[in-house]
């Protein structure tokens, strides 16, 4: 019950802060309407006695009271609904914002890799849709308390034994609590199949995936999997609903016995002369109202318990995320140091190892690296070598499982995350397709300057992406995508160019990460893009000592890098510039030669043979993955 009271206090205080007038009006109308119902029963009893006694004037007055109280009872609740409807919507929005803050407000993204958190987020997202009734449940519960108090007083005036009737409410309430727990367990047990089924639905209902699904003839298979998952989730929910229904039925049967006993007591009292006919009418009407009150109380307590459970689950999730944001007992990335204005020494990785949450297999093992200030660094290796994981660690999206990352000698954990993020720019391999205007889709890379056309145009120019905007019907004002509006749909390469423009919005970042920036471009275009990016990197490097990190599968595109880091199964295999690594004749030289051989004369219409070409991976190589869900 303490959880319920905390939830009630939170919602009422939130409504009061949002609009005191509407909150006070809603409570006043509901309380008045609730008190009117038992008073109406009292007026009916009085009118009955007056009619039987021949007191026509008093009977007419009591009848007028019945009419007025009936109007109040029937209408005030509806007027109250108008007052608290908007406040209830605000309560739902508040819950959604708190959930969004938990999902996106942590320093890193490790919590998204934990299945138990994903299940909790699924349950909470579904529960948040019920919060528009939250304040209404509280207001009506207050009215119900008033109604039951008046009912108890009126029953006591007929017979002290009738005071036991409200006690018959207890079994249904207890049964409702037990039923709520059974339903909550069922919802949690069904969260995983529900989450996977929803993901399958989004996959099959998204236009972007339609072509591949049809070519691969996956439609029927995905529908079958979706049906099986929903059947599993429904079966678990059905068992929970059945248990809850049986428990609630037992509680209501107990109340029915008490209800019947109250009516019999009133009739017996009237027969023996201890009560008037009006008293019998009063008891019968009040007993009907108590029945309605019990039904309402069970429903309201169910709603309140459900909201309280959701708030508790949200609070527990916040605590769990806070605990998991600690490494070695110290808050990860929660220190008070701001990032340096410029990098003088660079970024150092000391014996860094990392395994994704929920797994034991390390993706990176004992990585020792020095990325000098002002350098352009290329990270290469086969799929699954740990390249994308490494750059996410540099950005602070994850914390090392073991070891340290130093920014000019300061542990990254001791650097406040938000200021550091403002000095980082990144174009990730799994870039977001923001379906906004082109101006906004690019300008999000530097939010304070999102509406500055000159800044956005300059970022697109630095990213070699101006040609995309030139093709749009309304330039930077063109709406992108068709999921939410009738906008322009782009090719994969064009979407990636906008994402790269977003990465270049910040003119002087300390760290610029470009993770497979040419993955959606053809090799010739990627060569030109990398040369342009390298020039930009040298400019920013001279200005603030910025480090630019490229990740690429195509080795010829990273030959201009000052430092090339070769990863092999999560370990650093080699470090050096292109000439040094080729002369060493080890892993890098072998990969470079293998890729170059794919462009022998006659095998590609554009590229020349030899090390100066822009090779693709050799045919037959099978990509591996750092972990499920990453590239």
Image (tube, grey):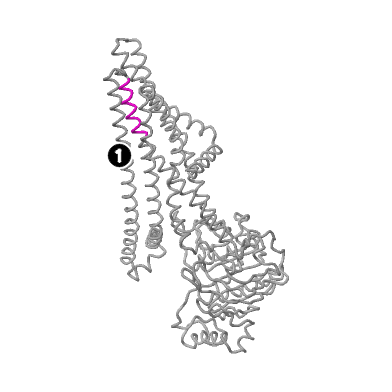
For the view shown, which residue lies furthest in the right direction?
344
* x then y, percent, for residue 221: 32, 67
For the view shown, which residue lies furthest in the left direction?
271
Circle 1 residues within 10 Å: few <14, some 14–19, many ≥20: some
Q: Is residue 37 left or right of residue 607?
A: left
User: What residue appears at the point 29 percent right and 10 percent down from the top-left corner?
Assistant: 54
Q: Nearer the viewer, residue 194 or 472?
A: 194
- The span shown in magenta is 279-293
Q: Quadrant of residue 555?
A: bottom right
Number of numbered markers: 1
Q: Quadrant of residue 394?
A: bottom right
Please determine whether, in this image, residue 615 is positioned above or below residue 279. Answer: below
Q: Nearer the viewer, residue 326 or 277?
A: 277
Q: Nearer the viewer, residue 422 or 316?
A: 316
In magenta segment, residue 227: no
Please determine whether, in this image, residue 15 is positioned above or below residue 355. Answer: above
Dot 1 falls on a residue whose secondary structure is helix
Q: Main secondary structure of the magenta part?
A: helix
Q: Quadrant of residue 140?
A: top left
Q: Is residue 271 left or right of residue 412?
A: left
User: What residue appears at the point 51 percent right and 38 percent down from the top-left corner?
Assistant: 12
* x then y, percent, for residue 599: 50, 85
* x then y, percent, for residue 286: 34, 27
Please determine whether, in this image, residue 166 is positioned above or below residue 530. Answer: above
Please determine whether, in this image, residue 303 is positioned above or below residue 508. Answer: above
* x then y, percent, for residue 612: 57, 84
Q: Nearer the viewer, residue 360 or 77?
A: 360
Task: Residue under label 1, please give it.
Answer: 253
């Amino acid at each position: 019950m303490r959880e319920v009271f905390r939830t009630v206090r939170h919602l009422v205080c939130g409504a009061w802060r949002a609009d005191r007038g509407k909150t006070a009006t809603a409570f006043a109308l509901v309380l008045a309407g609730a008190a009117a119902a038992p008073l109406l029963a009292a007026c009916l009893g009085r009118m009955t006695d007056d009619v039987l006694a021949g007191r026509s004037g008093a009977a007419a007055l009591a009848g007028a009271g019945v009419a007025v109280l009936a109007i109040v009872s029937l209408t005030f609740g509806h007027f109250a609904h108008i007052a608290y409807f908007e406040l209830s919507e605000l309560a739902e929005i508040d819950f959604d914002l708190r959930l969004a803050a938990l999902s996106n407000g942590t320093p890193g993204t490790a919590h998204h890799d934990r299945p138990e958190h994903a299940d909790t987020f699924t349950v909470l997202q579904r529960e948040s849709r019920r919060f528009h009734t939250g304040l209404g449940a509280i207001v009506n519960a207050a009215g119900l308390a008033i109604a039951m108090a008046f009912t108890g007083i009126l029953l006591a005036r007929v017979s002290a034994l009738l005071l036991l009737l409200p006690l018959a409410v207890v079994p249904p309430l207890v049964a409702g609590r037990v039923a709520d727990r059974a339903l909550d367990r069922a919802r949690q047990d069904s969260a995983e199949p529900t989450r996977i089924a929803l993901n399958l639905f989004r996959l099959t209902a998204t236009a972007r995936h339609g072509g591949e699904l049809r070519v691969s003839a996956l439609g029927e298979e995905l529908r079958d999997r979706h049906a099986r998952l929903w059947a599993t989730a429904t079966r678990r929910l059905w068992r929970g609903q059945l248990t809850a229904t049986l428990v609630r039925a037992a509680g209501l049967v107990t109340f029915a016995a008490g209800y019947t006993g109250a009516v019999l007591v009133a009739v017996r009292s009237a027969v023996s002369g201890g009560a008037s006919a009006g008293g019998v009418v009063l008891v019968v009407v009040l007993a009907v109202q108590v029945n309605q009150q019990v039904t309402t109380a069970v429903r309201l307590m169910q709603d309140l318990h459900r909201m309280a459970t959701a708030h508790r689950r949200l609070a527990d999730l916040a605590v769990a995320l806070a605990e998991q944001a600690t490494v070695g007992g110290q808050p990860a990335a929660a220190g008070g140091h701001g990032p340096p204005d410029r990098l003088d020494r660079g970024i150092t990785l000391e014996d860094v190892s990392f395994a994704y949450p929920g797994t034991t297999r390390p993706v990176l093992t004992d990585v020792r690296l020095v990325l000098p200030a002002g350098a352009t660094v290329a990270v290469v290796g086969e799929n699954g070598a740990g390249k994308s994981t490494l750059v996410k660690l540099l950005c602070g999206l994850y914390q090392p499982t073991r070891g340290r990352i130093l920014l000019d000698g300061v542990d990254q954990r001791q650097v406040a995350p938000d200021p550091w993020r403002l000095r980082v720019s990144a174009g990730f391999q799994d870039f977001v397709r923001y379906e906004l205007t082109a101006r906004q889709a690019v300008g999000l890379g530097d939010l304070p300057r999102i509406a500055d056309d000159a800044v956005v145009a300059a970022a697109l120019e630095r990213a070699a992406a101006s040609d995309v905007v030139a093709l749009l019907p309304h330039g930077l004002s063109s709406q992108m995508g068709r999921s939410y509006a009738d906008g322009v749909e782009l090719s994969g390469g064009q979407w990636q160019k906008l994402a790269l423009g977003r990465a270049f919005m910040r003119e002087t970042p300390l760290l610029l990460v470009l993770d497979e920036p040419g993955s959606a471009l053809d090799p010739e275009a990627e060569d030109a893009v990398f040369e342009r990016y390298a020039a930009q990197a040298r400019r920013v490097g001279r200005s603030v000592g910025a480090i630019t990190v490229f990740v690429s599968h195509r080795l010829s595109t990273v030959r201009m890098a000052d430092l090339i880091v070769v990863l092999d199964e999560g370990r650093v295999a080699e470090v050096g510039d292109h000439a040094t690594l080729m002369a060493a004749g080890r892993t890098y030289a072998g990969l470079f030669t293998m890729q170059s051989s794919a462009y022998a004369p006659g095998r590609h219409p554009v590229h020349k043979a030899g090390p100066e070409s822009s090779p693709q991976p050799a045919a037959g190589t099978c990509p591996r993955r750092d972990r499920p869900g990453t590239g």
